[in-house]
Image (tube, grey):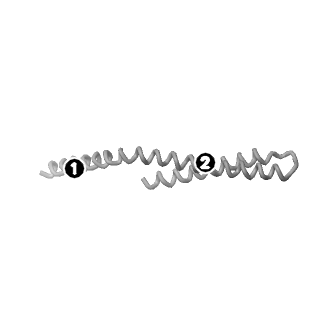
Amino acid sequence: MEGVTRFEDEVRRRAERRAEAEKEKDQSIWFGLGMMGVVGWSVAVPTVLGLAVGIWLDARTTGTVSWTLTGLGVGVILGCLTAWRWIERESRKR
């Protein structure tokens, strides 16, 4: 009888896992779309801000350094790091 009980428990656990996976399947589409939006904004906003600061610095300074390109590079790097950190944090929650 113990073997039958273990078998029933295993079947019940697998059925529960399958039901949970089916429920999360619908949510994962929306989660994925939301994540793409957040990642996009996480990269876009620092990039545009870095570009704007670079243009502003180029207009006020003279020299051989292109602050526009520097600001663009720094903005992209900061944006990518922010997005990566957010994705890591969200993946740990799941």
At 74% from the left and 52% from the top, the residue drawn is 53
Q: What is the crowding at mark 2: few (fewer than 14 residues within 10 Å), some, or many (at least 20)?
A: many
Q: What is the crowding at mark 1: few (fewer than 14 residues within 10 Å), some, or many (at least 20)?
A: few
Amino acid found under the numbered disc labelled 2: Val
Amino acid found under the numbered disc labelled 1: Arg
Along the viewing direction, whichever of 76 and 5 lies nearer the viewer: 76
Quarter of the image where one finds residue 22: top left
Q: Which residue is mark 1?
A: 12
Which of the two marks, 2 or 1, is nearer to us in this view?
2
- Numbered circles on residues, count: 2
Q: Disc 1 on helix, strand or loop? A: helix
Q: Disc 2 on helix, strand or loop? A: helix
* Residue 46 locus on image (x, y percent): 65, 51
- The residue most toward the left is 1
Q: Which residue is mark 2?
A: 43
Mark 1 or mark 2, which is nearer the start of the sequence?
1
* Residue 87 locus on image (x, y percent): 52, 50
At 87% from the left and 48% from the top, the residue drawn is 63
Relative side of 6 to 31, left or right: left
Asked if 89 appears above or below 69 in the picture, the reply is below
* Residue 92 locus on image (x, y percent): 46, 54
At 38% from the left and 48% from the top, the residue drawn is 27
Q: Which mark is residue 54?
A: none
Relative side of 73 to 27, left or right: right
